[in-house]
Image (cartoon, rainbow, N blue to C red):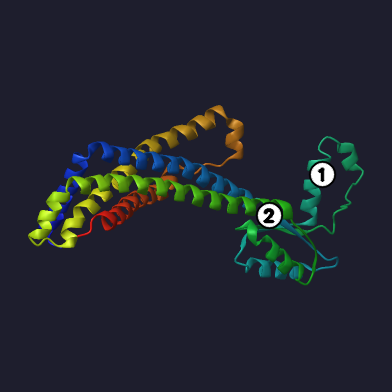
Amino acid sequence: MKISSIIYSIKQGLKNIRRNRMFSLASIGTIAACLFLFGIFYFILANFRYTVKIEEKSVGISIFFKEGITEDEIEEIGDQIKQRSEVATLEYISADDAWEKYKKDTFADEQELIDTFADDNPLEDSASYVVYLNEVAAQPEFVEYVKGLDGVRKVNNSDKLAKGLSDFNVLLGYVSGAIIILLLAVAIFLINTTITMGISVRKEEISIMKLIGATDYFVRSPFIVEGIIIGLTGAVLPLILLYFIYNQAITYIGQKFSILSNILHFLNVNHVFSTLIPLSLGIGVGIGLIGSVITVRKHLRV
């Protein structure tokens, strides 16, 4: 396509937007509103998933050894576990460490009771590995693997918590998909309406262009450009607003709701927008392109 044709398409696309100002503004406003809601939802979703991810990594699996096991055998078990791709960290807790932790947690204010044990360690056979996985969904398979290792006596894991976190992640995925589809459908409908009006206004002009030999692509391209410009504009506006809102929201929650900020873990603004900006721009341009192509093919029989 020639540069002159590209310039013509852009000029005509902008002219169509000005000519149908009210419908164009309505389309831009609706896309902006849809992508604003999408951005808010993305903030919630991204931070919830980030929180769940952190909580997943805090769900430990305790692995206890059989009586009489040697240090070399314990190290060999540790080496086998480390080779598993789902393992994030592996921590060894000796019997002495386990007893010290138990005393601190259980007998913190009862020194006399602690003294009765003298140098005895009632947890002398409680040395263990505590394993944290990258994804809690991998826990059932990993537990079955560990139970089959020689020298392993018992494996303690939180089945219900792991399943709950995994199911919550799946639910978030379904909900996000449904909302995105709904927002896209509404936005494409409005683009369709705007471009249909533009075609109706220019119908006579288009007929003359065809009579003098204009190609289908040359006739259709201004409307496609119009849709892309509307979609792009509708994507940029909410991004600017969302940037300031996210910063303010994190600061406000941290100052006013300290309890909530201890439960939830927030992503920094740069991390969030490194994904949200290309995603929103892509959706905006995609809405405009798909909406305009569908409309042109339906209403512009050239």
Q: Quadrant of the C terminus?
A: bottom left
Residue 104 position, x and y percent, is 79, 42
Residue 181 position, x and y percent, is 45, 51
Kindly tell me whether residue 118 is visible in this rendering: yes
Near-viewer residue (207 or 129):
207
Residue 125 position, x and y percent, is 84, 59
Q: Quadrant of the N terminus?
A: bottom left
170 versus 116 height, above or below: below
Q: Mark 1 points at which residue?
A: 103
Near-viewer residue (208 or 180):
208
Q: Is residue 75 left or right of residue 154?
A: left
Residue 60 position, x and y percent, is 69, 54
Kindly identify the residue that appears in the image at 36 percent across and 43 percent down: 31
Residue 73, quarter of the rendered image: bottom right
Q: Which mark is residue 224?
A: none
Kindly identify the residue that appears in the image at 86 percent across and 65 percent down: 67
Q: Mark 2 points at which residue?
A: 163
186 versus 2 height, above or below: above
Q: Is residue 116 left or right of residue 135?
A: right
